């Protein structure tokens, strides 16, 4: 097993991939690995203690996203399961409707399932394009809506660029045709204020490990009255909407993380925005031919995607890794792919920059010193790489 440096030696700027669990979250979870180990569905006092803890967590998660009823929270294994459940359930419960509308920049858990359903002949898929800033083409979206639309699935915010989508407006337009509206809010929860009830969104996916909670736990919000066809069958847990013994420690950790995020969001995000903006400003100033990817004015406070000319992102990330700086070239679910990001291709990023995109994503754990450290390393290294590199076209001859 690789010996890891102490966490405090790293500059960690890959928080859209995962966040470091809050110590308070870990402390909340530990008793349910020890004294509170009982099955929440068991009919005895120990089971009741675990069941009560699950219920508290349900209320905490509901409060974070502005849900009126904790019964609208269905615990799942994470964002991918929640996305799959929402899409498949909408097809099964919307009689006479077999069309799904999504965007070209969704998370792979949405796009891969839509491709599977299309190939199997189970659904017609409309993929709405984005412009060069990553913003949805509203005319194309409006034209795709019809009485045959079962579900619209559009992310709240993009995981690679941080671009925020107008989900409230999109949901209202979908409802005019009788369609359900689902949003993958995995990147948005805990980073922007959310009021699900006011937005009148039907289904929302969230994952705990993006907001300093544990991995392997998430939820699907299902607005009261929206029917759910279970993805996993075999038990009556989650009111019959998701079978399987509840992961009590992880659920408790999710609840604690949600409560902490709700409390800290108003103060944390303005501070994080300043860190991100300083990094953006200094790199664009000091690195020739670097460009910002995405909409500068409408994105998550913590996300910065920059692309560098004629350099492979993997080379940049390797250099940063050696300097104990963690960043990413895009979705962690696509790591290892030799193909350029589907998000960047959809945005028609110039070929010269297409493979040189690096995402820096902040959290409440980041401080000014992290930006200082990155600015000491990155601009000089990028300049050296650009001097040493051949034109990318020649590399593919």
Image (cartoon, helix red, strand yellow):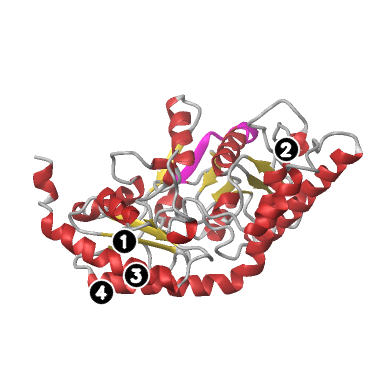
Q: Secondary structure at mark 3?
A: helix
Relative to 267, say whether 262 is above or below. Answer: above
In front of the other: 110 or 332: 332
Q: Earlier in the sequence, mark 4 or mark 1?
A: 4
Residue 97 is situated, as x and y percent measured from the top left of the image, at 57, 35
Q: Earlier in the sequence, mark 4 or mark 2?
A: 2
Q: Earlier in the sequence, mark 3 or mark 1?
A: 3
Q: Earlier in the sequence, mark 3 or mark 4?
A: 3
Determine contact: label 4, label 2, CB under 8 Å.
Answer: no
Q: Where does label 2 land, which residue?
A: 246
Q: Which residues are magenta?
A: 92-102
Indicate left or right for 6 with 352 as reference.
Answer: right
Q: Where does label 3 land, which residue?
A: 280
At 31% from the left and 52% from the top, the residue drawn is: 317
98 inside magenta stretch: yes
**Residue 91, picture quadrant:** top right
Residue 355 is situated, as x and y percent measured from the top left of the image, at 25, 50
Q: CA distance from mark 2 to mark 3?
A: 42 Å
At 56% from the left and 44% from the top, the residue drawn is: 79
Q: Where does label 4 land, which residue?
A: 285
Q: CA distance from mark 2 to mark 1?
A: 40 Å
Q: Earlier in the sequence, mark 2 or mark 1?
A: 2
Q: Where does label 1 land, which residue?
A: 306
**Residue 40, picture quadrant:** top right
Determine contact: label 3, label 1, CB under 8 Å.
Answer: yes
Indicate left or right for 380 with 209 as reference.
Answer: left
Quadrant containing the C terminus in the rendered view: top left
Indicate left or right for 95 with 37 as reference.
Answer: left
Q: Secondary structure at mark 2?
A: loop
Q: CA distance from mark 4 to mark 2?
A: 51 Å
């Amino acid at each position: 097993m690789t010996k890891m440096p102490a966490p405090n030696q790293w500059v960690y700027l890959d928080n859209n991939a995962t966040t470091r669990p809050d110590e308070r979250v870990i402390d909340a979870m530990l008793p349910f690995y020890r004294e509170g180990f009982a099955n929440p569905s068991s009919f005895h006092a120990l089971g009741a203690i675990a069941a009560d803890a699950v219920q508290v967590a349900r209320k905490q998660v509901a409060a974070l996203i502005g849900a009126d009823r904790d019964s609208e929270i269905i615990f799942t294994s994470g964002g991918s399961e929640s996305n799959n459940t929402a899409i498949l359930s909408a097809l099964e419960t919307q009689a006479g409707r077999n069309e799904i509308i999504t965007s070209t920049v969704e998370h792979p858990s949405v796009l891969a399932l839509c491709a599977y359903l299309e190939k199997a002949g189970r659904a017609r898929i409309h993929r709405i394009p984005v412009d060069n800033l990553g913003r949805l083409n509203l005319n194309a979206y409006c034209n795709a809506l019809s009485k045959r639309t079962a579900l619209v699935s559009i992310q709240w915010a993009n995981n690679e660029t941080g671009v925020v989508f107008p989900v409230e407006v999109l949901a209202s337009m979908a409802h005019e045709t009788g369609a359900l509206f689902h949003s993958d809010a995995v990147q948005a929860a805990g980073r922007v204020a959310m009021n699900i009830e006011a937005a009148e969104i039907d289904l929302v996916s969230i994952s705990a490990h993006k907001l300093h909670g544990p991995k392997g736990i998430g939820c699907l919000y299902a607005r009261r009255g929206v029917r759910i066809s279970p993805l996993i069958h075999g038990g009556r847990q989650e009111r019959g909407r998701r079978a399987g013994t509840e992961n009590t420690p992880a659920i408790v950790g999710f609840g604690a993380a949600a409560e902490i995020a709700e409390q800290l969001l108003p103060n944390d995000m303005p501070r994080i925005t300043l860190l991100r903006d300083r990094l953006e400003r200094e790199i664009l100033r000091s690195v020739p031919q670097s460009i910002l990817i995405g909409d500068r004015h409408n994105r998550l406070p913590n996300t910065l995607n920059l692309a560098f000319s004629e350099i492979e992102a993997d080379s940049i990330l390797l250099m940063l890794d050696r300097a104990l700086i963690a960043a990413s070239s895009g979705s962690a679910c696509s790591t290892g792919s030799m193909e350029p990001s589907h998000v960047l291709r959809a945005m028609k990023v110039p070929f010269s920059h297409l493979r040189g995109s690096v995402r820096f994503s902040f959290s409440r754990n980041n401080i000014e010193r992290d930006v200082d450290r990155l600015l000491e390393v990155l601009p000089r290294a990028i300049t050296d790489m650009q001097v040493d590199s051949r034109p990318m076209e020649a590399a593919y001859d």
